[in-house]
Image: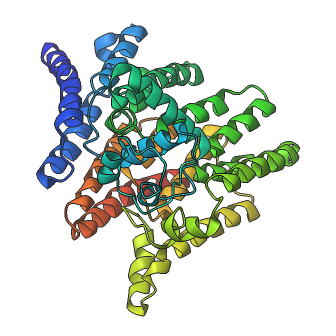
C-alpha cells in the first residue's frame, strides 16, 4: 500500500509542474512536443483519477489542488492558440467605441483618423486578419473588461487569464452544488482535465464562460431563470441555439422560448450579422464551406465529394445530416436524455460528430456534460489525447489522415461499447 500511495503523491506533485511547462514552454509547431503532450498529460490525468485516496474526506483540500492546477498556468503566453490576438484586437477597437463587425482587422488599420497603437502586433500574430469578427457582444465585453484589468496589471494576458481563473473557480463550486453526492473521481473529470486547464485558462478560450452559463442553466429552479440562462448561452456562441432541443417536450415554455430566441437572433443580426453578405463569404459562413479541422464524420462526405469536385460542400452536407438526425429524433419521439445535462450531452455530442471543425477547446463543454456519467475517466482521457493530438494538423498536412483514423478507432470503440450497453439495458 505504501508504494502506490507514494507513487500517487509523486504524480500529484509532477502534474502541476507538467502543466506549467506545457503552458509556458510548449510549441504547437513541433510535432515531437505535441506527441509528448498528447500522451503524457492524459496519462497523468487518468492515473490521478483516484486522487481522492490521498485526500480522503477532506473535500476542500481536493478543491485546493484543483485551484492550484489552474493557478500554475496563469501568466503563460499564447503558445498553443493564436485566437487570443483576435479577441484582443476586437476588444481594443470596442474600447475605442468602434464596432468590430464593420471592418476586417486589415481594413481597419488602413482607415484614417483611428488609433492603431498596439494593433499592428496583434494583426501580425492573428490567424484571421482578412475575416470579419464572429464573436458575439458578450464575448466582446468580456475581453474588453479583461483588457482594462490587464492594463492595471501591466499584462493584458494576465488580466484576462485572471478573469478566467476566477470564473473557473466559480465553476468548481457550481459543479459541487449541481452534483453534491458525486465522488471526487467524478469531480476530477472536469477539475483536473488538462484540456480545460490549458485551453480554458492558459489559452483563454471563452468556452469557460459557456461552462458557467450551462451550470447556471442546470441549477435554475424556475423555468423563467432557465430560459434566461438559455438566452445568455445563445449570446456566447451560435451553436448554443441547438440546446433549444432540450425543451421540445416541455410545451409550456414554447411561447416564451420562441420570443427569447427571436430577441437573441435579432441581437446577432444587428451585431455579428450586420453585414450578412460579408459574414457569409469571409466570416462565420466559412465554417460551412471552407474551414475544416479535426472533423470526425465530415471527412467521409469530403472524400465522397472529392472526385466530383464538390468537396467544398462537405461541411454543409454534414450539418444537413446532423439536422436531419435531430428532426428524426423529434419525429420518432426519441428522448435526448432524462435530465438537462443528459440532453445537452446528447445534443452536443451529435454536433461534435458532424462538425467540420473541432478545435481542442470545443471538448470543454463535452467534458462538463459527461461528469454526470459513471466511470468516464478512460473515455475522457482518450478524448483529451485526441484533442491534443489534433495540434499535429498545424505541423504536417498529411497528419490529417493519422488523426482521422485515430479518432475513428478511439471514438468508434467507445461508441460500440455504449451501443452494446444500451442493448443489454433495454
Name the residue: 27% across, 23% down: 72
Hey, which quadrant is residue 402 in on the image? bottom left
Indicate the quadrant containing the N terminus: top left, top right, bottom left or bottom right: top left
Q: Residue furthest bottom?
A: 308
Please tell me whether residue 348 is drawn above or below residue 71 in the rendered image. Answer: below
**Where does the image place residue 203, in percent across and percent down from the top left?**
34, 38
Please tell me whether residue 54 is drawn above or below residue 82 in the rendered image. Answer: above
Name the residue: 29% across, 66% down: 405
Name the residue: 49% across, 73% down: 289
**Where does the image place residue 271, in percent across and percent down from the top left?**
64, 51
268 lies left or right of 382: right
Name the residue: 58% across, 40% down: 97
Hey, which quadrant is residue 53 in on the image? top left
The color scheme shown is rainbow
Please tell me whether residue 240 is drawn above or below residue 375 in the rendered image. Answer: below
371 lies left or right of 383: right
Q: Nearer the viewer, residue 387 or 55?
A: 387
Q: Nearer the viewer, residue 248 or 73?
A: 73
**Where does the image place residue 350, in percent across and percent down from the top left?**
54, 57
**Where does the image place residue 324, in percent across and percent down from the top left?**
64, 69
Can residue 337 be spotted in the picture? yes
327 lies left or right of 149: right
Q: Nearer the viewer, residue 405 or 261?
A: 261
Can residue 339 be spotted in the picture? no
Amino acid at each position: 500500500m505504501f508504494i502506490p500511495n507514494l507513487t500517487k503523491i509523486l504524480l500529484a506533485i509532477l502534474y502541476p509542474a507538467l502543466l506549467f511547462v506545457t503552458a509556458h514552454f510548449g510549441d504547437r509547431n513541433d510535432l515531437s512536443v505535441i506527441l509528448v503532450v498528447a500522451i503524457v498529460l492524459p496519462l497523468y490525468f487518468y492515473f490521478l483519477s483516484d486522487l481522492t485516496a490521498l485526500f480522503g474526506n477532506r473535500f476542500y483540500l481536493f478543491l485546493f489542488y484543483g485551484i492550484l492546477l489552474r493557478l500554475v498556468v496563469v501568466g503563460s503566453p499564447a503558445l498553443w492558440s493564436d485566437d487570443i490576438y483576435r479577441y484582443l484586437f476586437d476588444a481594443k477597437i470596442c474600447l475605442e467605441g468602434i464596432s468590430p463587425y464593420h471592418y476586417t482587422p486589415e481594413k481597419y488599420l488602413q482607415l484614417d483618423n483611428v488609433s492603431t497603437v498596439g494593433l499592428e502586433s496583434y494583426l501580425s500574430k492573428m490567424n484571421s486578419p482578412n475575416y470579419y469578427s464572429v464573436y458575439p457582444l458578450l464575448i466582446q465585453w468580456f475581453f474588453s473588461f479583461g483588457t482594462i484589468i490587464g492594463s492595471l496589471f501591466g499584462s493584458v494576458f494576465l488580466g484576462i487569464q485572471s478573469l478566467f481563473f476566477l470564473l473557473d473557480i466559480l465553476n468548481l463550486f457550481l459543479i459541487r452544488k449541481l452534483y453534491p453526492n458525486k465522488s471526487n473521481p467524478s469531480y476530477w473529470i472536469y477539475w483536473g482535465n488538462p484540456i480545460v486547464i490549458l485551453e480554458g485558462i492558459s489559452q483563454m478560450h471563452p468556452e469557460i464562460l459557456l461552462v458557467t452559463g450551462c451550470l447556471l442553466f442546470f441549477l435554475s429552479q424556475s423555468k423563467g431563470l432557465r430560459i434566461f440562462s438559455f438566452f445568455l448561452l445563445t449570446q456566447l456562441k451560435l451553436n448554443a441555439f441547438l440546446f433549444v432541443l432540450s425543451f421540445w417536450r416541455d410545451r409550456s415554455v414554447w411561447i416564451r422560448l420562441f420570443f427569447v430566441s427571436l430577441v437573441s437572433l435579432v441581437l446577432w443580426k444587428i451585431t455579428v450579422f450586420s453585414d450578412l453578405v460579408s459574414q457569409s463569404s469571409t466570416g462565420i459562413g466559412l465554417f460551412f464551406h471552407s474551414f475544416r479541422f479535426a472533423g470526425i464524420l465530415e471527412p467521409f462526405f469530403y472524400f465522397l465529394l472529392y472526385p466530383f469536385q464538390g468537396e467544398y460542400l462537405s461541411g454543409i452536407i454534414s450539418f444537413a445530416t446532423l439536422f436531419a438526425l435531430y428532426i428524426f429524433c423529434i419525429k420518432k419521439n426519441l428522448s435526448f436524455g432524462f435530465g438537462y445535462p443528459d440532453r445537452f450531452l446528447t445534443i452536443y455530442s451529435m454536433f461534435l460528430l458532424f462538425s467540420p471543425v473541432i478545435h481542442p477547446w470545443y471538448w470543454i463543454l463535452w467534458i462538463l456534460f459527461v461528469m454526470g456519467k459513471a466511470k468516464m475517466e478512460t473515455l475522457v482521457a482518450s478524448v483529451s489525447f485526441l484533442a491534443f493530438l489534433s495540434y499535429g494538423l498545424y505541423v504536417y498536412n498529411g497528419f490529417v489522415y493519422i488523426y482521422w483514423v485515430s479518432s475513428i478507432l478511439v471514438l468508434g470503440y467507445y461508441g460500440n461499447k455504449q451501443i452494446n450497453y444500451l442493448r443489454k439495458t433495454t
